[in-house]
Image (cartoon, rainbow, N blue to C red):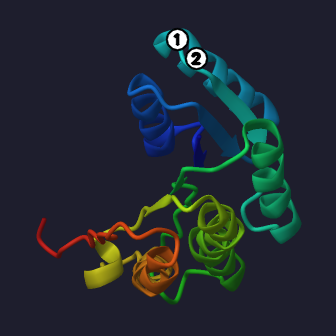
Amino acid sequence: MTLVTGGSTGLGRAIALGLASAGCTTVVASRRPEVCRQAAAEIAAQTGNTALGLACDVTEEDEVHHLVEEIVTEYGRVDVLVTSAGIQARGELGALDAVTSRRCLDVNVVGTFLACQAAVPVMRSAGYGRIVTLASALGLVGAAGRAGYAASKGAAVQLTRSLEPAQATISDRSTRRRTPRAGR
């Protein structure tokens, strides 16, 4: 069972499609219920594998925990979590407003944190689980006009690095981290 947050569009949808094509039962989660259901239906039709679309705002703790509980109730486990939900915050530092910056941090960092927080106990009790978090090279090097986004992705990189001890307690298998490198 694979859960992909932000899985109804863009990179998240491509990841969900790839995982379903590889034989995974996949839950596609994003804020918009109809878009989730449509993406899941198209993924299922293209791959012949089960795909389910469930609405969830990753910035809302209760919604994230309910999402994972719903998946566990239906499928008994979460084997893989992909945290793909993310948004941009573009603009020069002086022009970028706090509301946009906070929203970017909430989705890109807090959303990743909450999804991991909800999934790790389920994975630990099953004795297996993998977490894939998405970040950006901008989280390591920054860029003009991208301070809000770069800050959020830098925090996501550090969150991912901090997850290693939690993942190590999920199973005896080794964990691997792939961090984006500047210039690649």
Q: Is residue 111 left or right of residue 13?
A: right
**Residue 117 image position (x, y, % from top left):** 67, 74
Q: Quadrant of the N terminus?
A: top right
Question: Is residue 142 in sight in this rendering?
Answer: no
Q: Quadrant of the C terminus?
A: bottom left
Q: Nearer the viewer, residue 166 or 40?
A: 166
Q: Nearer the viewer, residue 157 or 98?
A: 157
Seen as rendered, the residue at the extreme left is 183
Q: Nearer the viewer, residue 134 or 123?
A: 123
Residue 31's place in the image compared with 158, above or below, is above
Question: Is residue 28 in sight in this rendering?
Answer: yes
Residue 127's place in the image compared with 78, above or below, is below
Any mark on residue 48, and which? Answer: 1
Name the secondary structure under disc 1.
loop
Give the residue at x 72% y 61%: 58
Q: Is residue 154 left or right of residue 97?
A: left
Whole-Å distance between the Cαs marked 2 and 1? 5 Å
Q: Nearer the viewer, residue 160 or 97?
A: 160
What residue would you read off at disc 2? 44
Give the residue at x 51% y 58%: 129
Name the secondary structure under disc 2.
helix
Q: Is residue 142 left or right of residue 39?
A: left
Q: Are marks 2 and 1 in contact (CB under 8 Å)?
A: yes
**Residue 30 image position (x, y, % from top left):** 69, 46
**Residue 13 image position (x, y, % from top left):** 50, 36
Any mark on residue 182, and which? Answer: none
Residue 74's place in the image compared with 149, above or below, is above
**Residue 83 image position (x, y, % from top left):** 54, 58
Q: Examine the image and state in which quarter residue 39 appears.
A: top right
**Which residue type carries mark 2?**
Ala
Give the residue at x 29% y 82%: 140
